[in-house]
Amino acid sequence: MSGINKVILVGHLGKDPEVRHLEGGVTVASFPLATSETYNKDGKRVEQTEWHNIVLWRGLAEVASKYLQKGKLVYIEGKLRTRSFEDREKIKKYVTEVVAENFTILGRKSDFEAAPVSPSQNISAPKHEDDFLDVDGVSGDLPF
């Protein structure tokens, strides 16, 4: 049996997507996403925020660069990827990212007046082997 690597997040963008164009015209976008949960500790309400590194490739990156901005609420489906690199001091570092397969912009109708994407429109990445992305099509339904 093979394993399952599936991540579902709902959160707010911490900053506008950073877009880069790699060799061969490949586009990649990345941004931090904040998810928060609240709980009671010693009778007080405590909010804990987690930050996630989101990466989008090719067409999905292009769409994200047009329609996502800091503060937007989004639903993201993707897969966890851990990669390593050496910093300037030649120390090996690891980073875990969510490689997005699709996203849905959430929010009030007024949040979408400036953009041609309708509320809760699901935006999926096209299939591309080396990015491990799935095609879900574009759907107006929320996946939860």
Image (spheres, rainbow, N blue to C red):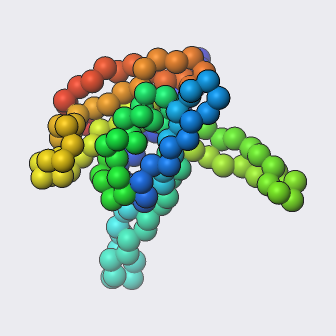
Q: Position of residue 20 (x, y in %)?
A: 55, 41
Q: Where, quadrant-wise, is the C terminus in this rendering?
A: top left
- In this picture, residue 92 sits left or right of residue 104: right
- Figure quadrant of residue 15: bottom left
Q: Where, quadrant-wise, is the N terminus in this rendering?
A: top right
- In this picture, residue 58 sits left or right of residue 86: left
Q: Tell me if residue 117 comes above or below residue 139 in the rendering.
A: below
Residue 126 in view in this figure: yes
Q: Position of residue 13 (x, y in %)?
A: 39, 55
Point 22% across, 37% down: residue: 117
Point 87% across, 54% down: residue: 90
Q: Position of residue 37 (x, y in %)?
A: 37, 62
Q: Tell me if residue 45 comes above or below residue 76 in the rendering.
A: below
Q: Position of residue 66 (x, y in %)?
A: 34, 41
- In this picture, residue 105 sits left or right of residue 102: left
Point 56% across, 27% down: residue: 25
Q: How many marks?
A: 0
Residue 98 in view in this figure: no
- Figure quadrant of residue 61: top left
Point 36% across, 27% down: residue: 124
